[in-house]
Image (cartoon, rainbow, N blue to C red):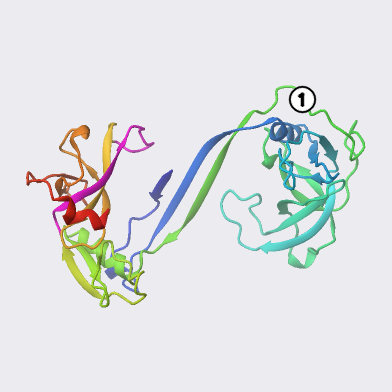
Amino acid sequence: MTVSNIGEPLMTAAASSAGVLRAPLVVEFPFTRSLGPVQSAFLTGLRERVVLGVRTSDGRVMVPPVEYDPRTAEEIRDLVEVGATGTVTTWAWNGAPRPQQPLATPFAWVLVKLDGADTAILHALDAPGPEAVRSGMRVRVRWAGERTGAITDIACFEPGEGGEEPGAPAQGAAYDGRFGDPVTGIVAEARLDYTYSPGRAQTAYINALSERKTVGERCPSCHKVYVPPRGACPTCGVATTDRVEVGPAGTVTTYCIVNIKAKGLDIEVPYVYAHIALDGAGLALHGRIGGIPYDQVRMGLRVEPVWTEGGRYPDHYRPTGEPDADYDAYKELI
């Protein structure tokens, strides 16, 4: 998973009218997915301008197709071709499309029951405005000019009926799903971009880090010190406003050894990420452990933060040289 700030860095409190930090944030997790025989046939069919569903044991036709019957959990392979036209069952207008959505201009998200199908497929409908969309309207597939074997091979739906594809079998006919050069895998790109604000409590925490201080907030009821602060105690349900400086040193409570190099992270593997209970804190935060071989990191190890020149937060934590903490001193923070 990749998490990154884009554009300008986090604003300072003085630059924000509310005194709270905010910045654009992107969270994305592209992953490679292999396809079974049914999904492979479905996506390969889209590339060939053919929409396939699958017939369940009770005779229903599901589009998009699934490989196991949702009622009986039986494996199903009975592929069926359905029409490239259908009926809108329900819809919602999208007046401000986001990047990488199907259309750059305002459009409707629609559920369309294609002719010959018993379930609806979600996609975009190109329409001039919400007044032109209604449940029950007839729509047809608009195929993408260049198709690769993905759901985006359906560029969108558009109002109206459509003619039959040349040589297409009748709707509801069995289909063997045999195509040349079948699609066997896809890259699914999950992405979320938005403006993130850490809120009052974490703004103070981030600003303190830039001064090489770690500041938490104490619950006025149970007196637990939260680091990073949350603005309220999740146990007592009351606001936390009493700020407390903790650390800088702390104790490793638990840890893991990372053996897979993350994209864009300039750290050689293996390395250790640990939960660290800073002195005075009521719960552990996580940080990377450096300055010691990975196989010598242990529970109870006493560590301190290491700051880089101009850094706004600790780069990593290193051993202090103190004796290890006794287990009873941190067992409640594991």
> For this rendering, which residue is in front, 103 or 231?
231
In the rendered image, the vertical position of residue 12 relative to residue 305, given as above or below: below
Any part of residue 261 in sight: yes
Q: Residues within 10 Å of mark 1 (few under 14, many from 20)?
A: few
The quarter of the image holding the N terminus is: top left
For mark 1, give the secondary structure. loop
Residue furthest out toward the right? 170
Q: Residue at x 21, y 42 (%)?
A: 289
In the rendered image, the vertical position of residue 125 relative to residue 2, given as above or below: below
Tell me: 113 left or right of 31.
right
Q: Residue at x 29, y 65 (%)?
A: 229
Residue furthest out toward the top? 180
Q: Position of residue 196 (x, y in %)?
A: 41, 61
Q: Position of residue 150 (x, y in %)?
A: 67, 37
Q: Position of residue 70 (x, y in %)?
A: 72, 46
Q: Position of residue 155 (x, y in %)?
A: 71, 44
> For this rendering, which residue is in front, 146 or 326?
326
In the rendered image, the vertical position of residue 188 relative to residue 182, given as above or below: below
Quadrant of the rendered image containing residue 198: bottom left
Any part of residue 312 in sight: no
Whether the magenta-drawn stretch holds residue 30 is answered as no
Magenta-drawn segment = 247-266
Whether the magenta-drawn stretch holds residue 259 is answered as yes
Q: Residue at x 13, y 53 (%)?
A: 249
Residue type (three-letter) at the residue carrying disc 1:
Phe
Tell me: 241 left or right of 307.
right
Tell me: 288 left or right of 83.
left
> For this rendering, which residue is in front, 15 or 239?
239
Q: Which residue is mark 1?
A: 179
